[in-house]
Image (spheres, helix red, strand yellow):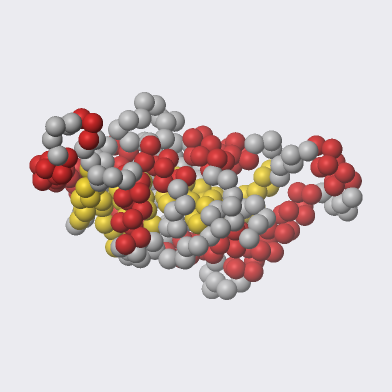
Amino acid sequence: MRPLKTILVCLDLTEMDDFLIRHALHLCEQVEDIEKIYFAHNIRFEDADDAQDLLDQLDKPLRAIVEDTLDEAIQTHFATVVDPPAYEILVREESSSPAALAELADSHQAGLVVVGKKIAFKGSGMAVVKLLRILPAHTSLLLVPETSRPQIRNILAPVDFSKASKVATEMAAYLRRQTGAELHCQHVFSIPSFYFPSIMVNDLEPSMRQEAQKRWREFAKGLHQVGAIDLDCTFSFNSDTSISQTITDHANMTHQDLIVVGSKGRGGLAAFVIGSVALQLVQAELPIPLLVV
């Protein structure tokens, strides 16, 4: 995988911006490869008439006002850092914020886009899902909830032994090397009960676990080739909840700071199809930062 040199942080002039700026700074402190941060905002009005009335009352262009406001917030945090990274503010005026941000990520070759995951602030996750679907292939998406702390000490990489989870685990291993964090993998296996109407599902758990462990050993061999060595994997048998909930419960119980997941599982039919587990994690009220690769 390519080193993470450029990140794009999406700001929206809300309380969430402080969280995102702090997380971006912390990420730059831990990931030495990062050379530049782009802070982006898209100006979008629901009502064109109301927008024009507002613009007529301003003493300078709205874009300039937004840039000044963002720069003031950024400088407040950057002033506390001895050697802050280079940054640039990008302001657009497009009808679709996801489309504008995806275009900026592509044109500026951002390896990572950072967005806020609003839980207490009651923000909608639909725009995030749309952004994830249209981001360029070389760009990952980091969702940061306002309840999280800017630290990366423990990383969880859920795996289903697919190509997508291999790419995600390689990214997790890269972040482990950069940050010194602990990295653990998790595989969730289950047996739909309607497949075996006359057999107790729990009776099949030992054989399913053995099969999962066998597949993990083969999967891990491929990871060794890219330097992802000394990885351990937790095998979680899921009988009564969703896979995403099992992952969330394990992450909370083991105090993970970051979950790294592939964007397309085995069920994906095309490059733009988001895997069901990744989509569930994106839409869930997850209190832990989620990196979708």
Q: Quadrant of residue 100?
A: top right
Percent position (x, y) of residue 228? 24, 52
Residue shown at 44% from the left, 36% from the top: 137
Q: Quadrant of residue 32?
A: bottom left
Question: Is 256 or 150 nearer to us in this picture?
Answer: 256
Question: Is 79 or 155 nearer to us in this picture?
Answer: 155
Residue shown at 59% from the left, 50% from the top: 123
Q: How many marks?
A: 0
* Residue 41 in the image: above or below residue 271: below
Percent position (x, y) of residue 183? 28, 58
| Drawn side of residue 170 relative to residue 115, left or right | left
Q: Residue furthest top?
A: 269
Question: Is 223 or 209 nearer to us in this picture?
Answer: 209
Q: In this view of the protein, can residue 95 be seen by the observer?
A: yes
Residue shown at 30% from the left, 56% from the top: 250
Percent position (x, y) of residue 291? 42, 50
Task: State the quadrant of the N terminus.
Answer: top left
Residue shown at 62% from the left, 49% from the top: 40
